[in-house]
Amino acid sequence: MFEVFTNSIVYPKNIINYHNKKGGFVFLYILVLVLLMSISTVVFYISQKPTEITTENSGCEVIANNLVCTGENYDVNNKFDVYDFNIYLLEETALISQIGDLGDFALILQGERLTVVVGDQTINSLTFLSTYGIDTLEEAIAILKFSIISAGITMGIISNTIILLFIVFISTIPFMRFRSMISYKKIFKMLVFAATPMAFLFAVYNLLNFDMIFFFILMLFAYRSVFALQKELHFRVLNKSGGGYVNPENDETEVTEEVDENEEEETEDDSDDEFKL
C-alpha cells in the first residue's frame, strides 16, 4: 500500500500498473484516504478544551434523575461552550424562549429531558436522565461530550467519504473514451489511487485552513496524478492501434508487451474484465 501511495504522488503514471488490485485492497485504500482527510476532526477534539460544567458554576444538580436548578449561580442564559455546541441548563418551569441567544447548535438539559436545537428549530427532544439512569451532573455532561465527539467524527468521516468518491466519479468522465479498452471497474480503481494527492491536500487544508484561492491553485497540482494517468492510457491506446508504444518522455517508439510484468501475481478471477491494452 505504501508503494501505491508513493507512486500516486511521485510517479503517477505508474498507477496504471495497479489496475488489477483486488476490491478489498481498493476499499482499504479508500478508508486510509478518508482517515487521512479526517485527521483535522480528531485534532480539533483533542486540542479543544470545553468549558467545565459543575454544580458550582451552573447552580444545577441532578437529583433522582432530574435536573434541579436552585443554586446561586443559576441563570437561564448561562452558556457553556462544548466543542462548538452551546449547552444550557434550565429549571423545569423555565421556557426555552427565555434564552437570549441559542447560537447555531444548542443542547438544552431541562428536568429529565435533553433538547437539541439547530438555529431556531427544535430537532429532537428525548427523555435523557431517567433513560440512562444518570445520577450526577458530571455524568450527564460526560455522556454529552462523548456523544458530541462520536457524532462529530462520524459525520466528518461520512462527509469526507462523499467528497472523495465524488472527486473519483467526476474524474472518471474523461476516461469514458477508454471503455472499449478497459472496464469501468479498473478505471475506478486507478482513479482511487490517483486521488491520493487530493486527499493529502484536503488533510492539510482542513488542518491549516488557509485561503480558498490558494487551495484551488494547489488542487490543480494535486490533479496532476489524474492527468498523468490519462496521458499514460492515451499512449497505450496509440500503441495498440499503431503497433508500438510512444514513450511520452523521449518520443521514441518501442514495442511493449500487452501484459504487465506483475499482472500474473495480481490478476483477478474475472476473465471478462481483462485489461485489453
Image: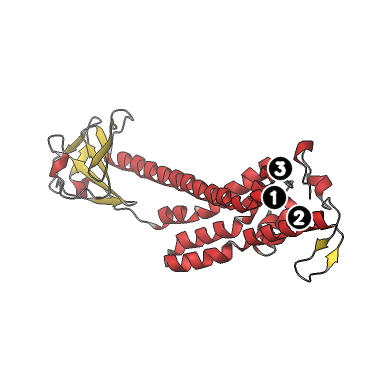
Whether residue 4 is visible: yes
Which numbered mark, 3 or 2, is in the foreground of this view? 2
227 vs 20: above or below: below
The residue that mark 3 highlights is 22
Q: Are marks 3 and 2 in contact (CB under 8 Å)?
A: no
As drawn, is 210 to the left or to the right of 165?
left
Q: Alpha carbon of mark 1 to alpha carbon of mark 2: how far?
A: 8 Å
Q: Are marks 1 and 2 in contact (CB under 8 Å)?
A: yes
Give SS at disc 3: loop
Give amino acid for label 3.
Answer: Lys
Pick out the residue farthest to the top.
Answer: 131
Whether residue 270 is visible: no
Instruction: Indicate the colouring scheme.
Output: secondary structure
As drawn, is 118 to the left or to the right of 167?
left
* Spot occupied by residue 164 in the image (x, y as percentages of width and height): 54, 50
The residue that mark 1 highlights is 178
Which residue is located at x 81 percent, y 48 percent? 263
195 vs 64: above or below: below
As drawn, is 202 to the left or to the right of 195?
left
Give amino acid for label 2.
Answer: Val
Give SS at disc 1: helix
Q: Alpha carbon of mark 3 to alpha carbon of mark 2: how far?
A: 24 Å
* Spot occupied by residue 113 in the image (x, y as percentages of width and height): 25, 33
Which residue is located at x 38 percent, y 41 percent? 147
Which residue is located at x 54 percent, y 52 percent? 167
* Spot occupied by residue 125 in the image (x, y as percentages of width and height): 27, 33
Sequence-wise first label, 3 or 2: 3
Q: Nearer the viewer, residue 250 or 244?
A: 244
Which numbered mark, 1 or 3, is in the foreground of this view? 1
The residue that mark 2 highlights is 237
